[in-house]
């Protein structure tokens, strides 16, 4: 795929300098490059939607979303995940939040899913602020970013949330015992493409604490992703 294979050819640059291979190859951060093109933005959204389902496996069947009327998917792209979360929960409403260029096609998808009147689509930047909600969800967002950036995002969510508000991260959790795991391949992708990395349970716990949240539990599914549930302190 043009968004990954070619930049990966510059991985030796990362090993030598520490600069992300994709940034060096493309001349700018990958997300900036993708979001300049409507075609690449749609391709990225499709990849995240399809790949996300495969990586989650049966996680959404095993994990019960916390109570709360309004569910906000932060960095939710085209709304695919939010549509799944709301499909069997008719009493709930949703907020889809991502960059304006990323959510531009979301109303069509949400309308097709019968959710046009239950989801507010909001364009914005999670490095600035996020909408208020009862439950927050972020799926494979924080692994894209370094720790300082993640804390900034988490602090913005904490600022919009009240104490006791739940945050659910759908992310890979690197085994603490060094066993083989798909997260280690993802970690290599993060090294080449972005500034983020995959994290172990203890690393997630520490990161969440810095952002104003306490890790409550982790639920695993049949795929590579887990549900990491935390509470606003």
Image (spheres, helix red, strand yellow):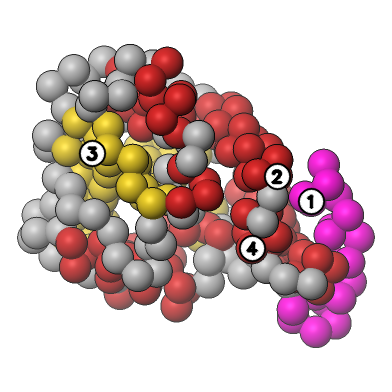
| Picture quadrant of residue 129 | bottom left
Across and down, in percent, residue 227 comes to 37, 41
Q: Earlier in the sequence, mark 3 or mark 1?
A: 1
Across and down, in percent, residue 80 comes to 45, 29
Residue under label 1, please give it. Answer: 4
CA distance for labels 3 and 1:
32 Å
Residue 67 horizontal side relative to residue 229, left or right: left
Identify whether 191 is placed above or below 17. above
Instruction: Tell me what residue is drawn at x 45 percent, y 78 percent.
Output: 148
The nearer-to-camera label among 1 and 2 is 2
CA distance for labels 2 and 3:
27 Å
Which residue occupies the foreground of this view, 186 or 113?
113
CA distance for labels 1 and 2:
12 Å
Residue under label 2, please give it. Answer: 40
Q: Are circles 1 and 2 on residues that touch, CB within 8 Å?
A: no
Instruction: Indicate the secondary structure of the residue bearing disc 3.
Output: strand
Instruction: Indicate the secondary structure of the residue bearing disc 2.
Output: helix
Q: Where are the magenta residues, as a range?
A: 1-19
């Amino acid at each position: 795929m043009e968004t990954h294979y070619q930049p990966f050819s510059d991985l030796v640059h990362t090993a030598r300098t520490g600069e992300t291979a994709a940034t060096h190859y493309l001349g700018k951060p990958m997300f900036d490059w993708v979001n300049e093109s409507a075609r690449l933005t749609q391709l990225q959204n499709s990849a995240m939607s399809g790949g996300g389902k495969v990586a989650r496996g049966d996680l959404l069947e095993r994990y019960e979303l916390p109570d709360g009327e309004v569910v906000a998917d932060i960095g939710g792209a085209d709304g695919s995940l939010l549509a799944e979360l709301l499909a069997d929960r008719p009493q709930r409403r949703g907020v889809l939040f991502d960059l304006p260029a990323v959510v531009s096609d979301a109303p069509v998808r949400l309308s097709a899913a019968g959710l046009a009147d239950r989801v507010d689509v909001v364009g914005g930047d999670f490095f600035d602020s996020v909408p208020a909600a009862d439950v927050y969800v972020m799926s494979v967002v924080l692994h894209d970013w370094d720790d300082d950036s993640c804390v900034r995002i988490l602090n913005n969510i904490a600022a919009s949330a009240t104490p006791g508000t739940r945050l659910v991260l759908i992310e890979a959790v690197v085994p603490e015992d060094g066993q083989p795991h798909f997260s280690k391949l993802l970690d290599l992708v993060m090294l080449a493409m972005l500034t983020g990395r995959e994290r172990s349970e203890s690393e997630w716990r520490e990161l969440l604490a810095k952002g104003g949240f306490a890790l409550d539990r982790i639920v695993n599914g049949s795929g590579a992703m887990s549900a990491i549930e935390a509470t606003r302190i």
